[in-house]
């Protein structure tokens, strides 16, 4: 990606202009952002994905003023029971299953991979949608086939309907609305109230592709980081030497009372738990590349290191669609596991992290070759084609 070139995807803004003016600040409507885009999944294929055991999917229905939610996996009969209007099917992490989806995400490379969540695809006949709500995510809502009317409001009142099975805003008042057609994008920062309603005369129902970027809550980061620090303590990477001492112990009025002196001493011991930027980097690398709990990698069949390298030289290698790879300096994090290399070797792995693949390339360095081989056997990499 050329850093300062204007992108049709961003309405001819440069990525820098987009980041300065819009990212996490205000909505942006981009007409014809991806010319000719109508999506790469038919409604039937999306429904097929929603029937798979490992795929996360939901059906949201709006009937007689009430919202209902059903989680997948579904069976085919489920779909035939649905009415003609006012429902939607949503399928999460489509980029884990379709190479086209992973390629689509690469067009959004002006946002760091560490912020990426997934590609969700929805299908809805006329009137379908998930109701007025806000997300804690940044999202690019890309219209596939059909049309969707987006209503939007920067209202402060974000109170939710109490007894609904999904997050529905109690008092949504649309301030603006846009009709999105195939290839149009609406970018929304977190906390902006919105409601997307499928518009269809029956000839072509609405499919929306949501490219979502996660913004972890401070509470979540702190809880995960404390877990990481606990592991460091258990692995003795964090060592606090010494033992509680009270050679100056004073006779207490109440033997059951926790003394101020004890609280003070323990406070001093705990203040020795410290961390450096290197610890934070390692935490982020592991945490942000960690697969979600439901993800399973299928091990590849064993082959000799020589055959593996020959294949690398002929066809190159790519990250499995479910793999997440990040790096900092010469340390690489693949699916929650860290590995460090020297600068030269690192260049190959930086290309793999950024582009999700390396072109045909025989590897001379035995350490790098072994690492790629181990990742391949674990199912984290695959040979394209
Ligand atoms: C959709 O219905 O496809 C998008 C849901 C949303 O508004 O986040
Ligand atoms: Co939303």
Image (cartoon, rainbow, N blue to C red):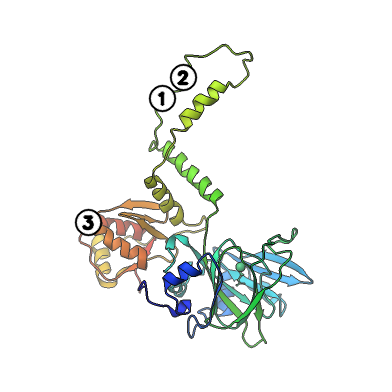
Give the CA separation, mark 1 to mark 3. Answer: 43 Å
Residue drawn 34% across the image and 61% down it: 376
Residue drawn 49% across the image and 80% down it: 33
* Residue 164 higher or lower than 253, as above or below: below
Foreground of the two, 254 or 356: 254
Is residue 282 among the parts visible in the rendering? yes
Residue 307: which quarter of the image? bottom left
Q: Residue furthest top?
A: 251
Which quadrant holds the N terminus? bottom left
Judge left or right: residue 151 versus residue 171: left
Between discs 1 and 3, the one toward the N terminus = 1
* Residue 288 higher or lower than 37, as above or below: above
Residue at image mark 1: 242
Foreground of the two, 331 or 172: 172
The image shows residue 343 at horizontal and vertical percentages of 25, 56
Disc 2 on helix, strand or loop?
loop
Is residue 369 among the parts visible in the rendering? no
Between discs 3 and 2, the one toward the N terminus = 2
Residue at image mark 2: 245
Give the CA separation, mark 3 to mark 2. Answer: 52 Å
Give the CA separation, mark 1 to mark 2. Answer: 9 Å
Disc 3 on helix, strand or loop?
helix
Q: Which mark is residue 366?
A: 3
Residue drawn 27% across the image and 56% down it: 370
Q: Residue furthest left?
A: 364
User: Where on the image, by quarter, is ligand 2?
Assistant: bottom right
Q: Residue furthest right?
A: 64
Label 1–label 2 contact, CB within 8 A:
yes
């Amino acid at each position: 990606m050329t850093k300062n070139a204007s992108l049709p995807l961003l309405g001819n803004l440069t990525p820098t202009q987009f980041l300065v003016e819009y990212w996490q600040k205000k909505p942006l409507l981009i007409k014809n952002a991806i010319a000719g885009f109508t999506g790469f999944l038919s409604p039937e294929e999306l429904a097929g994905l929603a029937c798979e055991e490992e795929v996360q999917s939901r059906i949201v229905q709006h009937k007689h003023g009430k919202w209902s939610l059903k989680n997948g996996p579904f069976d085919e009969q489920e779909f035939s029971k649905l009415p003609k209007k006012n429902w939607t099917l949503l399928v999460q992490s489509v980029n884990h299953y379709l190479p086209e989806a992973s390629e689509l995400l690469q067009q959004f490379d002006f946002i760091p991979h560490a912020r990426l969540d997934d590609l969700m695809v929805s299908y809805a006949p006329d009137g379908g949608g998930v109701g007025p709500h806000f997300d804690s995510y940044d999202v690019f809502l890309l219209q596939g086939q059909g049309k969707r009317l987006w209503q939007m409001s920067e209202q402060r009142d974000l109170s939710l309907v109490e007894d609904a099975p999904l997050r529905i805003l109690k008092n949504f008042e649309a301030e603006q609305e846009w009709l999105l057609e195939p290839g149009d994008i609406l970018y929304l920062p977190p906390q902006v109230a919105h409601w997307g309603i499928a518009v269809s005369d029956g000839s072509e129902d609405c499919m929306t592709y949501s490219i979502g970027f996660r913004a972890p809550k401070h509470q979540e980061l702190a809880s995960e980081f404390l877990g990481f620090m606990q592991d460091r303590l258990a692995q003795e990477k964090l060592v606090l030497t010494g033992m509680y001492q009270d050679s100056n112990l004073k006779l207490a009025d109440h033997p059951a009372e926790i003394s101020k002196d004890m609280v003070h001493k323990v406070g001093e011991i705990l203040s020795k738990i410290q961390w450096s930027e290197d610890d934070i980097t390692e935490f982020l690398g592991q945490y942000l590349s960690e697969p979600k709990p439901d993800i399973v990698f299928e091990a590849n069949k064993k082959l000799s290191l020589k055959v593996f390298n020959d294949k690398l030289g002929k066809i190159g290698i790519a990250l499995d669609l479910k793999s997440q790879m990040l790096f900092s300096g010469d340390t690489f994090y693949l699916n929650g596991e860290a590995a460090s290399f020297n600068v030269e070797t690192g260049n190959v792995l930086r290309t793999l992290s950024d582009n999700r693949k390396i072109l045909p390339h025989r590897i001379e360095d035995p350490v790098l070759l072994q690492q790629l081989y181990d990742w391949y056997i674990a199912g984290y990499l695959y040979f394209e084609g």
